[in-house]
Amino acid sequence: MKGKMPPMKFLILLFLIFSLTEHSFSQNNPVGECKATEYNVSSLEWKIWGYRPENWKLDFNFNELKGTKAEYISIPAKVPGSVQKALRDAGIIDDWNIGNNYISIEWIENRHWIFAAKIPDEWINKESNMILRCLGLDEVTDKESARIEEIKIVTEADKMKDHGNLKISAELTPRALHGKVRIQLSKDTGEPVFDETFPAAQLREGKVWDNLKIKRWWPNGSGDQVLYELVCTLYDADGKNCQVIERNAGFKNIEVKRSKLIICVN
């Protein structure tokens, strides 16, 4: 979204949706000057409040950034980021990438969420126009921006040894096709498995990494549930960081023996 706003002390975004990409805040200098100053609001101290639908209208104080009747009050958050990520970082919900945890957090979409941050006084010039520029809001994306709209990650492990394969494919906006993607796979200790940058268009058909040296993921009681951290960073044609996607990935070999209806892991 983009438009003129009057001078303000606070930046408040009310969402019925749940994630934010990069935002910038800029202001034009007084008439007669052509320069504009731009600030990245990701540097601000963001907090979120969670309400049952519409209840924030009767409670939240937009002047003081207070809401005493919210179910979730002043939870630290990051922009870019999401409600789910903020709640997980605060220890309120479990990691939805593990098991069936995603089922227990479905209530989040049935709340209204307020993202808010205080703008430093030195950013404000009463004689200038101010513009808030959002590169994306939740799943409502700007087709003119570089963005990965959907990503698919498939892993597989060798049955006899700790070697694995990884395939990543994605749906991208037209502008993203002209950019580059950086894929980083790391152990839970932070030690890198690989770090590669390549044209983003390759993700349309799928990018494959074979014979990676990994530790296999085992069922409970059979071994360790080893997970790797995968980070996908999208850059546009100008080299600007447009999006970061983080996932956990485990490598295992699954075999279905149809005659006995047995599923074998590793």
Image (spheres, rainbow, N blue to C red):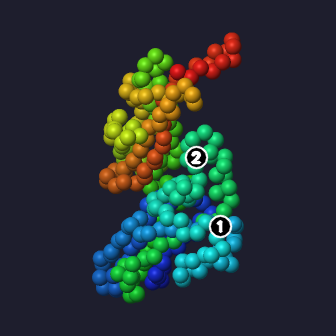
Residue denoted by label 2: 96
In the visual, does 18 lie left or right of 261? left
Mark sitting on residue 42: none
Q: Classify 10 Å Cα crowding around label 1: few (below 14), some (14-19), many (20 and above).
A: few
Q: Secondary structure at mark 2?
A: loop
- Residue at horizontal 44%, vertical 74%? 131
For image coordinates 43% across by 61% down, the residue present is 22
Residue 45, how many percent across, how many down?
Answer: 44, 69
Q: Residue under circle 1?
A: 71
Query: Measured along the vertical axis of the image, is residue 153 above or below residue 14?
Result: above
- The amino acid type, in three-letter code, at marker 1 is Glu
Q: Residue furthest top?
A: 259
> Does 244 appear above or below 193?
below
Q: What residue sits 43% from the left and 28% below the top?
A: 215
Three-letter code, disc 2: Trp
What is the x, y in percent for residue 37? 33, 74
Which residue occupies 39% across, 48% down? 234
What is the CA distance from the residue labelled 2 to the residue labelled 1? 20 Å
Q: Residues within 10 Å of mark 2 (few under 14, many from 20)?
A: some
Q: Out of 32 and 183, give the one closest to the viewer.
A: 183
